[in-house]
């Protein structure tokens, strides 16, 4: 049975002191969080809490963390949760606040609610199956569609992302009158993302959630590389009605490879003239100790609630938006 909705509406109170979300939205959030906890309780997945403040943020050059002194507000609880798994914890999940230093917009609030979970013994497809079941429960939707990154990119752009060249991508972007305002030289992944955002994302997940999986290996982040095809990573993202909902991995367990990826991120941050950040050595030590075979995913609760209620602006599902916090 999917999660039932309360259709009763409530007027929005005027004034900067007032909440931006209605009682309907706040009540729907409470029901959603309760349904999520019941979902994982049925599967024996343990709820955990980890620190929101840490000594090291993500190194990803496209994700900025809020910092104060030698501490960073976490953009995701991923690193700490993996340390729990390395210590012998079974499958775990967490509902928590996360923070990303980005401009507030219709689909993003710098402070947001995140559901993140890790399933020991799962691969990419096991995790997609479980997430599909959760989305059916929360959004009352049909089973999801699934497509590889390569196939959907070819279908919507006419280019094979795994073999095309940088000039191919630039030329295709110009054909679509896509311009980029940047003072930095863009690499192949930047152009892939530009075309994917404008030509692929709007055309998927319109009737049911869509899982796009097997991203290019250069976009692996913290995912394993596929053993059968070294050109792709064991990673997926989920889209529904124009909204990116989640990012999941068959998790990388090799501490040496993870260290190399962190260093590559740091080099790119330097090239882009971004602030230097420390590498999370505690995560590297945990991987060296031994991370079990597992898959994990992060799902944005605020965006999910927007879709459930048919709302267009994230501030409508928050008690107080960024401007009123």
Image: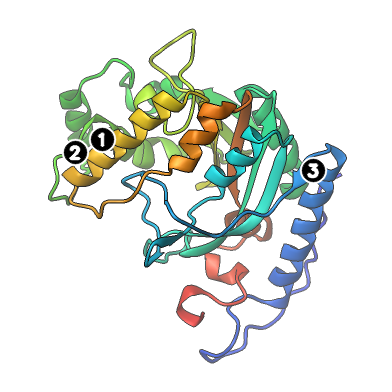
Compared with residue 66, is residue 24 higher up or lower down, i.e. above or below? below
Please tell me whether mark 3 or mark 2 is closer to you in this view. Answer: 3
Which is more N-terminal, label 3 or label 1?
A: 3
Foreground of the two, 287 or 274: 287
Location of mark 1 (residue): 191
Residue at (76% x, 69% y) in the render? 27
Location of mark 2 (residue): 186
Foreground of the two, 286 or 203: 286
Which is more N-terminal, label 2 or label 3?
A: 3
Q: 10 Å neighbourhood of mark 1: few (<14), some, or many (≥20)? A: some
Q: What element carries label 3?
A: helix
- Asked whether disc 1 touches disc 3, contact meaning CB atoms under 8 Å apart, the reply is no
Residue at (63% x, 55% y) in the render? 301
Foreground of the two, 183 or 120: 120
- Asked whether disc 2 touches disc 1, contact meaning CB atoms under 8 Å apart, the reply is yes
Q: Is mark 2 on a helix, strand or loop?
A: loop
Q: Please provide percent x and percent y for residue 128.
A: 65, 30
Q: Give the number of the disc on residue 40.
A: 3
**Residue 272 visible, this angle:** yes
Foreground of the two, 98 or 189: 98
Q: Distance between the residues labelled 3 and 2?
A: 41 Å
Residue 264 found in image quarter: top left
**Residue 240 visible, this angle:** no
């Amino acid at each position: 049975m999917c999660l039932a909705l309360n259709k009763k509406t409530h007027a929005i109170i005027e004034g900067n002191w007032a909440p931006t979300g209605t009682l309907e939205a706040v009540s729907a959030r409470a029901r959603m969080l309760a349904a999520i906890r019941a979902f994982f309780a049925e599967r024996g997945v343990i709820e955990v809490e980890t620190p929101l403040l840490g000594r090291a943020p993500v190194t990803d050059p496209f994700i900025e963390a809020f910092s104060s002194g030698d501490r960073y507000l976490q953009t995701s609880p991923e690193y700490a949760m993996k340390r729990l798994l390395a210590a012998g914890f079974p499958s775990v999940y967490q509902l928590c606040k996360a923070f990303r230093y980005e401009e507030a917009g219709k689909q993003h609030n710098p402070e947001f609610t995140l559901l993140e979970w890790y399933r020991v013994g799962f691969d990419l497809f096991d995790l997609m199956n479980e997430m599909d079941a959760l989305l059916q429960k929360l959004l009352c939707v049909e089973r999801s569609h699934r497509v590889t990154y390569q196939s959907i990119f070819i279908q919507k752009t006419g280019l094979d992302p795994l073999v095309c060249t940088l000039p191919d991508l630039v030329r295709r972007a110009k054909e679509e009158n896509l311009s980029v305002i940047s003072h930095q030289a863009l690499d192949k992944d930047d152009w892939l993302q530009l075309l994917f955002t404008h030509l692929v994302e709007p055309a998927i997940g319109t009737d049911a959630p869509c899982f796009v999986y097997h991203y290019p290996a250069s976009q692996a982040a913290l995912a394993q590389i596929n053993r059968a095809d070294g050109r792709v990573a064991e990673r997926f993202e989920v889209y529904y009605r124009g909204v990116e909902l989640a990012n999941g991995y068959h998790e990388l367990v090799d501490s040496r490879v993870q260290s190399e990826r962190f260093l590559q991120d740091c080099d790119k941050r330097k090239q882009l003239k971004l602030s230097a950040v420390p590498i999370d050595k505690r995560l590297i030590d945990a991987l060296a100790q031994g991370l079990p075979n597992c898959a994990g995913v992060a799902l944005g609760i605020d965006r999910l609630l927007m879709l459930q209620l048919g709302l267009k602006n994230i501030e409508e599902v928050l008690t107080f938006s960024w401007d009123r916090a």
